[in-house]
Image (spheres, rainbow, N blue to C red):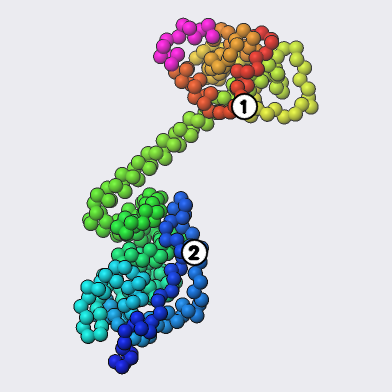
Amino acid sequence: MVTACSEHHQVKAAESVPPPPPAPWKSGGYQKRFRVEPPNQLGRCCVSTATRAMWDRLFNESCKADVVIHTDNGSIVYAHADIIGTASPVIKGMLKQAKRHGYWQSIAIRGVPQDAVRAFIRFLYSSCYEKEDMNEFVMHLLVMSHVYVVPQLKQLCEWHLEQGLLTTENVVDVFQLSLLCDVPRLSVVSHRMILKNFKKVYASEAWKAMKKSHPFLEKELSDSMIHGENRRKEGMRKAKEQKVYAQLYEAMEALVHICRDGCRTIGPQGKDLKENEAPCGYEACKGLETLIRHFAGCSLRVPGGCVHCKRMWQLLELHSRLCADSNRCCVPLCRNFKERKEKQSKKEEGRWKLLVKNVLGSKRFGCSPFFLSLPSSSSP
């Protein structure tokens, strides 16, 4: 415990103690988009190391101190009223209301460990802190910085929590404190960590304590977890659907390419294919060539008779619904499917229209699709 100097040295602190050093950064607000920079980049400080050491020594030695700060377990921390009152407007108000007992003014900071109180008061003197104290008392310091309105320390605590002190063991407590202490960014960060590690956090003692003390908050977190999981599954389902539509789009382009230009061993009659041609740029060509060869030689080439042939019939019909000019189209049966769709039911027609819309929507660019803009002069 630190002791004060002798009685004959006890005079008013304002007569011998200079004003406190400036804050460690000039801007107390958040950066753009709530991006928090490391403490040494939050602002410039013109105070030298020697000056900071002098303020630390003034606090540690308590020379000419005039404030007694009572903490838990009957411990006492000595300080100077002008310094801590200037650094914290709340403490300044407490000192004004405190009754004097001779020279000393007395205030109390309870509910936190004595070492945390010392680390907090030391920061009011020199804007410095020990790394070990921050690691051990970061949540206590966050609470005191909010209660006693010390925004610089509050932002430092937030930064250190985001940079590694936030763990699955303390994330529930940090989340509750961030709501109580009005730290919106930290509440978002801790909320995301809870959702990301929900099973582990759900089994922790902190979660059980929150369930008893704040059941509505526990319910909101559980509901957000369920909502997030449903949204993730829905996103995966849509991604799979989009992949299928994109594959159908590529198949339509490759089908026109095969029937009009020819590719490898399949192509229009009377067209010689060069052996040394460059590799085909359509990824769907290889699969379509196999399917077309099967379709040409299959004895069950009727809808429903063969699984592979049925697939080919569906691709041909999809092409006919995408084709801009069936009269000049090079793809077989394009005109036949155009005429056939007029006899289909409204329900079936609606399904095809939806499929066409999704296939066209899977590729978005400025020019028209290959199979709509480049009809061949040859007839089917």
Q: Classify 10 Å Cα crowding around label 2: few (below 14), some (14-19), many (20 and above).
A: some
* Residue at image mark 2: 43
Q: Is residue 199 above or below residue 268?
A: below
Give the magenta-colored segment's residue range.
Answer: 338-350
Quarter residue 69 falls in: bottom left
Tell me the amino acid under the disc marked 1. Ala
Residue 363: say if magenta: no
Look at discs 1 and 2 and give the one toward the viewer.
2
**Type of secondary structure dominating the magenta stretch:** helix
Residue at image location 32% in from the left, 59% down from the top: 181
Q: Quadrant of the N terminus?
A: bottom left
Residue 56 visible in the current orientation: no
Percent position of residue 202, x then y: 32, 53
Label 2 secondary element? loop
Quarter residue 334 falls in: top right
* Residue at image mark 1: 284
Quarter residue 229 falls in: top left
State the CA–CA distance, disc 1 to disc 2.
57 Å
Residue 301 visible in the current orientation: yes
Tell me the amino acid under the disc marked 2. Gly
Percent position of residue 249, x then y: 57, 24
Q: Quadrant of the C terminus?
A: top right
Label 1 secondary element? loop
Residue 197 vs residue 221, the one in the foreground: 221
